[in-house]
Amino acid sequence: MNIIETALPGVLIVEPKVFGDARGYFFESWNQAAFEAAGITNKWVQDNESKSCAGVLRGLHYQAAPYTQAKIVRAIVGAVLDVAVDIRKGSPTYGKHVAVELSAENKRQLYIPRGFAHGFAVLSDEAVFSYKCDNIYMPSAERGIMFNDPDLAIDWRVSPGEWNLSEKDKKHPAFADIEPWEDVK
C-alpha cells in the first residue's frame, strides 16, 4: 500500500497493491494492521454505499459533535471527483480543499479525518461509491455547505447545466455561515 499526503494535513490518498492477471485482479481494500502502520487508527463502525448517475453531486456534508465522522471512501464502479474541505477552527488550511479522482480503474481510496466536510461529483455514466465511517450517521447532527460557494472555488469538473443535486444539497449555507468544527472530546 502506498500512502500519499495531500495539501491538507491528515487527508491521505491510499493506493493499494493490486495483483492482476488474465482472470482479473485482487487487492486488500482494508487491512487494519497496514492502515494502523500508516497512522489510520480509527475504529470503523459503519459502511455505506451509494449508486449515482452522471452529474450527480453529493455534498458538501459533515456531522456536528458528538457525531463527527472520519471516512475512507472509494469508487467501486465508475469515477468520481472526491472533495474534502477543512472546517477545523484555527487550522492553517481552514477553508481550503483537496480534490482527488477516485475510480474503479485507479482503485485509490481517500482517508478524510474528522474536521472536514466531504462531497463528490460523478464523472462517469454511473458510479458506485463506498464509505467506511468511524461514527454512526445521526440525522439531527447532519450539516452541509453550499457545494458551489465562490469562497471555496471548487472545480467539480461537471458543467453547471449537468449538476444533479438533492433538494437538501441545494439549500446548504455558505461556508462563511457555518460554525467551524472544534475537536470536542
Image: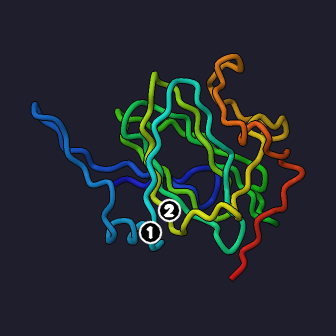
Task: First in sequence, mark 2 or 1: give its number.
Answer: 1
Residue at the image point whose x is 37% and y is 34% from the top: 77
Q: Which amino acid, by three-letter code, is at mark 1?
A: Trp
Q: Are marks 2 and 1 in contact (CB under 8 Å)?
A: yes
Residue at the image point whose x is 38% and y is 70% from the top: 37
Helix, strand or loop status at disc 1: loop
Q: Residues within 10 Å of mark 2 (few under 14, many from 20)?
A: many
Residues 66 and 71: in front is 66
Q: Which residue is mark 1?
A: 44
Relative horizontal placement of residue 115, taking residue 12 as reference (left or right): right
Residue at the image point whose x is 30% and y is 64% from the top: 31
Q: x%, y% of residue 128?
A: 42, 38
Q: Which amino acid, by three-letter code, is at mark 2?
A: Cys
Which residue occupies the extreme right position in the image?
A: 177
Quarter of the figure with the C terminus? bottom right
Q: x%, y% of residue 169?
A: 71, 40
Residue 133 - label: 2
Residues 153 and 136: in front is 136
